[in-house]
């Protein structure tokens, strides 16, 4: 237990330090605050979790310090030619509007195809309520093409939020509504966590794009608001799809505060989602090797699968992990999951530090009001904010959303040149 308390104290202190010394929405805060909250919830032991080893606690603390240090160092990177190039390519409001409309249209098209496909196979009610059958089908890859509407929806969320922050007066209200529509569309993807991701994308994009900077008090209030909204999404969404304490025999079977106090049972599953990855990490640490087993094919799973088809001896690791054993089965292992698989406990901390370096660099560009960087940083921000649960820095839906947003901006620029009968540089046709 001592290691658990020391870990919680170190991570809470780290989170407090980032709040005091770094500007709001810095990636170091996005990582450290959720980690501190998850660890503090874990040490409450409202469920009978396993006790963490000293090695697990040291790894979690070391990785968090490495991410924060990397983010701070990344924000200091200065490359004037690259910065000037970004400033020249910074899209104007008219291009952002067009790109946002294109992404909204793509979202609507693929969403209609997804709902129609689900309704055809499982019935309209199953498609609208996201029944177990539909969720299992999504996990099994039955909707591999149409479910990618989520990529467009996240891209539309970021772009609409940026436009809403830039638009004057009444026009901003319409774009805020468009942002909400893009977020709401993700409900059909069956993932409650993805709704929270979209909400974070919208807030980060909006705040970074507007002229007025966020105060520390506003940021803290916003964090509390996001936590409350996330709790509501998991509670209300859980009731809609049947994920409740009453329908979870694993939690009911073990002695816990929720079994002893019926009034707390509504919070049982949200508590598990917030804290269970921490003890699961301990299981993974004990099963890890010094140098890892997948050597890059966990973080870059999709790329390794493509290269395998060309004859290279690479196997992309599945992004769906096996569950821990009873009495509390769980299958997310914090953001140290993939670094441990790819680099083992020797390289896990440096890999996390590199992620922090990249996020810090994007943050620095976004802080200079590069709309391209704001878009990319906002879409990747949930990877840091949900790092207490899983590794998402190379998740297909986030990387895909960045690519869709950039493609939308490139197409908007091309359409503008065509409509204005301007010559198109060869570089834009490649």
Image: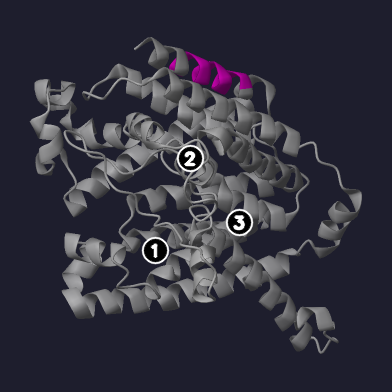
Nearer the observer: mark 3 or 2; the answer is 2
Q: Which label's residue is closer to the chain start, 3 or 1?
A: 3
Question: Residue at 26% across / 39% down in the picture?
Answer: 324
Which segment is the magenta one? 8-17
Q: Quadrant of residue 401?
A: bottom right
Query: How crowded is the residue under tag 3: few (<14 C-alpha within 10 Å), some, or many (20+)?
Result: many
Give the residue at mark 1.
Answer: 185
Q: Which label's residue is closer to the chain start, 3 or 2?
A: 3
Question: Residue at 18% across / 26% down in the picture?
Answer: 264
Task: Depth check: give the residue in front, 281 or 119.
Answer: 281
Q: Is residue 108 magenta?
A: no
202 sits left or right of 48 in the view: right
Q: Identify the secondary structure beneath mark 3.
A: helix
In the rendered structure, find residue 164 and report the number of the disc placed on it. Answer: 3
Give the residue at mark 2.
Answer: 340
- Mark 3–mark 1 Cα distance, whole angstroms, equals 18 Å
Task: Depth check: give the residue in front, 307 or 226.
Answer: 307
Q: Is residue 51 visible?
A: yes
Q: Main secondary structure of the magenta part?
A: helix
């Amino acid at each position: 237990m001592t290691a658990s308390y020391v870990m919680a104290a170190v991570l809470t202190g780290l989170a407090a330090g980032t709040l005091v010394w770094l500007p709001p929405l810095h990636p170091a805060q996005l990582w450290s605050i959720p980690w501190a909250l998850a660890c503090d919830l874990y040490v409450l032991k409202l469920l009978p979790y396993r006790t963490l080893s000293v090695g697990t606690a040291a790894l979690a603390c070391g990785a968090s310090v490495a991410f924060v240090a990397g983010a701070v160092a990344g924000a200091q990177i200065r490359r004037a030619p690259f910065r000037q190039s970004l400033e020249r390519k910074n899209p104007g409001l008219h291009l952002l509007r067009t790109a946002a409309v294109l992404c909204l249209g793509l979202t609507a098209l693929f969403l209609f195809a997804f709902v129609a496909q689900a309704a055809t196979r499982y019935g309209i009610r199953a498609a609208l309520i996201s029944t177990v059958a539909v969720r299992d089908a999504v996990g099994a890859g039955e909707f591999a093409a149409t479910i990618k509407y989520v990529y467009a929806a996240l891209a539309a969320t970021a772009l609409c939020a940026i436009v809403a922050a830039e638009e004057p007066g009444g026009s901003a209200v319409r774009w805020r509504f468009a942002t909400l529509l893009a977020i709401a569309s993700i409900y059909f993807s069956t993932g409650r966590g993805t709704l929270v991701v979209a909400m974070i994308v919208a807030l980060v994009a909006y705040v970074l794009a507007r002229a007025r900077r966020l105060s520390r008090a506003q940021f803290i209030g916003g964090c509390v608001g996001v936590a409350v909204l996330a709790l509501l999404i998991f509670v209300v969404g859980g009731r809609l799809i049947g994920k409740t304490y009453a329908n979870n025999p694993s939690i009911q079977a073990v002695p816990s505060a929720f079994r002893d106090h019926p009034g707390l049972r509504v919070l049982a599953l949200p508590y598990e989602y917030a804290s269970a990855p921490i003890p699961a990490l301990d299981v993974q640490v004990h099963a890890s090797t010094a140098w890892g087993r997948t050597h890059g094919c966990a973080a870059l799973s999709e790329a390794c699968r493509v290269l395998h088809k060309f004859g290279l001896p690479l196997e992309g690791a599945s992004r769906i992990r096996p569950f821990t054993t009873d009495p509390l089965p769980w299958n997310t292992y914090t953001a140290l999951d993939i670094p441990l698989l790819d680099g083992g406990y020797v390289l896990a901390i440096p890999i996390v530090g590199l992620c922090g370096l990249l996020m810090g660099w994007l943050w620095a560009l976004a802080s200079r009001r590069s709309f391209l960087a704001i878009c990319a940083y906002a879409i990747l921000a949930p990877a840091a904010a949900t790092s207490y649960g899983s590794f998402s820095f190379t998740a297909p839906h986030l990387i895909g959303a960045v690519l869709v947003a950039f493609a939308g901006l490139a197409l908007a620029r091309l359409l503008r040149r065509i409509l204005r009968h301007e010559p198109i540089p060869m570089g834009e046709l490649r």
